[in-house]
Every structure is written in structure tokens, then in C-alpha cells.
Image: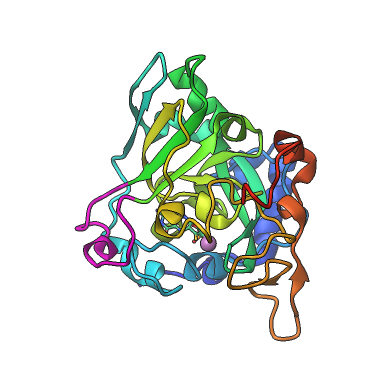
Amino acid sequence: MKLKWSEVTPEPVYLTRRALIAAGMASIAAPAFGLTGKPSALSTDEKPNSFEEITNYNNFYEFGTDKTDPARYSATLKPAPWSVKIDGLVDHPGNYAVEDLAPDSALEERIYRLRCVEAWSMVIPWLGVPLAAVLQKAAPQAGAKYVAFQTLEDPKQMPGQAYSSGIDWPYREGLRLDEAMNPLTILATGLYGKVLPNQNGAPIRLVVPWKYGFKSIKSIVGITLTDKQPQTTWQMLQANEYGFYANVNPQVDHPRWSQATERRIGAGLLGGRQETLMFNGYGDQVAQMYSGMDLAKNY
Ligand SMILES: Nc1nc2c(c(=O)[nH]1)N[C@H]1C(S)=C(S)[C@@H](COP(=O)(O)O)O[C@H]1N2
Ligand SMILES: [Mo]
């Protein structure tokens, strides 16, 4: 039987841990929680969703298309040992172990909003490292302009890959190099002080908080630096609905629904919908990367 986060750790204890970290006393709190991360000025003050919500309402089509499928069926995924192959336009290609790419001692806490293209949202306290720091280890070459990512492909570990969902596995995503290097962009290996649960993309996944959630690819096994814009899963599936950029934008509707508002998971029936913010509220950090671009065309 799996213990629920709510049974293990009442929220005040989590808040106490944050206070201890702030006081430089994280090691005292560490044993009960496993992982700790340095607090970041890039974190939001908004109240995080519960561990229960974050780990039971997921999109991870490799385990099924229902929101509860990943929590129910992802135990087959073996997140260790795990390495990420970094290749393409880099001086130091190779297979990098997750522990080397994101050592526990380097972890930062990043409490970010996550806005799914389906118009729901959460606030998640990730633990991770800047993607820029990971890419530097491989030393990108001058000609590198994009970064392509791939999820594991193994129907034994990811049973959803055995069924046709229209997706051409493995799941693929990509970023422009400047987006990849932006300080907001992280590779996460944990959340809520714990190692990343399988349903959230163990052992290592991308988090790009100003873009729709589908850009934040899970369970990454490959990172390729390239000079061409990479193909991405949702664009391959339905290019008129899902673009390469996928920046959160309340002014550009999905062809089948409005993107002006969102439903915050856990807000309850009386919570109502809230307005979606341009770039998911991260415009100060990212807007300059798109100056002069037509964001309705480059959706
Ligand atoms: N490999 C892979 N990565 C994926 C997905 C997926 O189906 N497969 N779903 C994406 C979508 S649509 C969203 S909204 C987020 C959800 O992340 P979460 O379940 O950790 O909240 O993961 C993204 N990453
Ligand atoms: Mo999503």
C-alpha cells in the first residue's frame, strides 16, 4: 500500500521545512523528506496544489489517456538506473547519468504554475536544475539553434505505447536554444521534497512554465542539439491545433475552445475560473525572446 502524502506530511510541516531551508537548516529537515532544494526568486507565492492532486491528475499518454491512468499504471516504469543521451551539435556527446546531470546537491526548488492546453492549471513545487547547466556539460556548438527531446520508448515499461492513440512514439518535444537556456527552464527530478513520481515523468522531465504543459516532456532519454526546428509530438498529430511554440496566450484560442480562462485544479466548485495570463504570468522573464514575432501565427 502506498502512503498518501497527506497522511505522511500535513501541510504546516512542509511549510516548516521551507522555513528551515530559508534559515540554512535544511539538513535537519532532510531525513523526513529525502530531497531538498535551494529556494528560488523565480518561484511563485501562490499556494501549491496538494501532492495528492499533482500525482493523481496527470497527462502521460504512455500510460493511458485518462487523468488517473498514469497514477494507476506507471509502476511498470523503471526509473533507475537511467541515463540521458546528449548528442548532435555538441563538443561532448555521451550518455550522462541522471545523478551527474542533476546532483541532489544542485537542486533548486521552483514553485511554478503549470497551464495545460486543455485549460486547467496547477501550482507545482518542483525540484530541479536549470536546463542551461545541463546543456553546458555537453558544450553546445556555435551552429546549435534548437534542442530536441525524446521520451523513453519501451511498450513493456510504458504499456500505452502498445495501443494506437495516433501518437508516433516516442513522445518528442523541442525548444529554441534561447528558450532552453532561459533561467526559468529546468529539468526536474523531484517535487514536494520527494523523488519525481513515475506519473510525473520520472526520473527526469522538462519544465517550461510559460508554455502549454505538453511542451514539458517527461521521462527523457535523449537530448539532441540541432540547427533545424525539431518535429514535436502534438504538432505531428494535429499541426493546425498545436504549434511548435505553444506559448500560453489568452488571446489566441485553440480552434475548439477558448484559452482566455482556466480551471485551477482543487479550487472547488465555488472556485470558478480564473483569467489565463500572457506567457502564464512569466512575461517579465520571457517576452523579449519573442519581440517582433507574430504570436498568432507562431502559436
Ligand atoms: N512523454 C510525455 N510527456 C508529457 C505528456 C505525455 O503524454 N507524454 N503530457 C504532457 C502534458 S499534455 C502535460 S499537461 C504535462 C502534465 O504534467 P504532470 O502530469 O506532471 O502535471 O506533461 C506533458 N508531458
Ligand atoms: Mo497538457
The residue positioned 63% from the left and 44% from the top of the image is 109
Q: How was this image coloured?
A: rainbow
Residue 148 is drawn in which quadrant?
top left
Residue 22 is drawn in which quadrant?
top right
Whether 131 is among the magenta residues is no
The residue positioned 74% from the left and 76% from the top of the image is 273
Closest to the observer: 200 or 59?
A: 59
Q: In the visual, does 243 lie left or right of 10?
A: left
**Residue 181 placed where, x, y %?**
60, 30
Residue 85 is drawn in which quadrant?
top left
The answer, for residue 34, to whether it is visible in the render is no
**Residue 80 placed where, x, y %?**
30, 44
Q: In the visual, does 143 lie left or right of 223?
A: right
Most common SS among magenta residues: loop
Counting the numbered discs, the total is: 0
Closest to the observer: 291 or 275?
A: 291
Closest to the observer: 200 or 5?
A: 200
Closest to the observer: 260 or 228?
A: 228
As drawn, 120 above or below 281: below
The residue positioned 33% from the left and 65% from the top of the image is 63
For the record, the magenta segment spans 152-170
| Residue lying furthest left | 156
Whether 161 is among the magenta residues is yes
The answer, for residue 79, to whether it is visible in the render is yes
Quadrant including the N terminus:
bottom left
The residue positioned 70% from the left and 45% from the top of the image is 294
**Residue 143 placed where, x, y %?**
49, 17
